[in-house]
Image (spheres, rainbow, N blue to C red):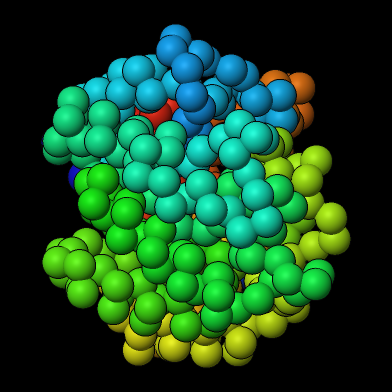
Amino acid sequence: MNKFTPTKPAGARSVDDITGSRRLRRMRKADWSRRLVQENRLTVDDLIWPIFVVDGRQVREPIAAMPGVFRLSIDLAVKEAERAAKLGIPALATFPNVDISLRDQTGSHILDPDNVINRATRAIKDAVPGIGIITDAALDPFTSHGHDGILRDGIVVNDETVEQVAAAAVIQAAAGADIIAPSDMMDGRIGAIRDALDANGFQDVAIMSYATKFASAFYGPYREAVGTAGLLKGDKKTYYIDHANSDEAVREAEQDIAEGADMLMVKPGMPYLDIIRRLKDEFQMPTFAYQVSGEYSMIKAAGANGWIDGEKAMLESLLAFKRAGCDGILTYFAPEVAELLKG
Ligand code: PBG
């Protein structure tokens, strides 16, 4: 037997003068101990997959600014929904690119029960009843000017827009949407949507509030995807939150909770981890981040150029949302990351 006899010669310096025995690296020394003390984990249950739908059949249009993301016709969106369900992704969030001829000043086509979003909801629910469908009630893909609201004399008018958004929410719920997620930031929309849903028998349809949506440069690729990039003049600063502000974001979330929001979302994601943490600490609500198109494209582009390890950066970015307090993440990486987690 090899016996270890501790020795400490008289007058010797403590071997741990430098650290005072406080060595956090002890738990980092091996993979097994790192796994043992890991505080946060990313699982497939954390993922919501945003997809883009278009009219037609067998359409799979690449979006130049979002490598690996496509506009899908409903038949192919159904196939992707089947794949997502098999991977265990809990929910999809759908966004349309509608023909320019269907866009107008008020976004009236959003009220058509047979628009591409409502048809997609019915088709996906029919084929894959077990996957959650989240629809956006904002007007921007349906307006001729790309704003999220009705434009009157150069102003995005609040209350008239809220009525339109609430009516659209009811139509989306009737098509089978499980969660209405309005991304427009009009004041009072959450309460109006809740009332409209309840009045029409959709008490069980939930609302995910885009509670804190910031005026941001990170939405660029999405606007290409839904075809609003060329339409939008000016910016959305009169309705999205100034990205300099944090207290205002807390007030927005507070109001949306009071109006009946079931879940909160912070958007964009990675530059706003401080907001996620504040909201989670303050309200303990189910809290989500939208890792938006620009965030996706930055990681994809740098990865494709070999400037960063794209896969590792993707995983690190998503785990950061969990650490910040998120219950889940809307991310275009969802299927890729689900495959990876499975393997
Ligand atoms: C607008 C809307 C935006 C996104 C989804 N819906 C922002 C915008 O165009 O101003 C952004 C999503 C993304 O960038 O991934 N209601």
Please indicate, yes or no, whether residue 187 appears anywhere in the rendered image. yes
Residue placed furthest toward the right:
234
Could you tell me how many numbered marks the image carries?
0
Q: Position of residue 86 (x, y in %)?
A: 21, 25
Seen from the viewer's position, the closer of residues 213 and 20 is 213
- Tell me where residue 78 sits by quadrant: top left
**Image height check: is 330 above or below 23?**
above
Kindly identify the residue that appears in the image at 80 percent across and 72 percent down: 153
Seen from the viewer's position, the closer of residues 315 and 201 is 201
Kindly identify the residue that appears in the image at 53 percent across and 53 percent down: 108
Residue placed furthest toward the top:
58
Q: Quadrant of the C terminus?
A: top left
Q: Position of residue 161 (x, y in %)?
A: 55, 70
**Image height check: is 85 above or below 234?**
above
Q: Is residue 175 left or right of residue 208?
A: left
**Image height check: is 161 above or below 226?**
below
Seen from the viewer's position, the closer of residues 217 and 171 is 171
Q: Is residue 119 left or right of residue 211?
A: left
Seen from the viewer's position, the closer of residues 115 and 293 is 115
Please indicate, yes or no, whether residue 25 appears anywhere in the rendered image. no
Q: Position of residue 79 (x, y in %)?
A: 31, 18
Q: Quadrant of the N terminus?
A: top left
Q: Position of residue 221 (x, y in %)?
A: 69, 39
Kindly identify the residue that appears in the image at 27 percent across and 49 percent down: 177
Kindly identify the residue that appears in the image at 69 percent across and 82 percent down: 245
Q: Is residue 103 left or right of residue 60?
A: right
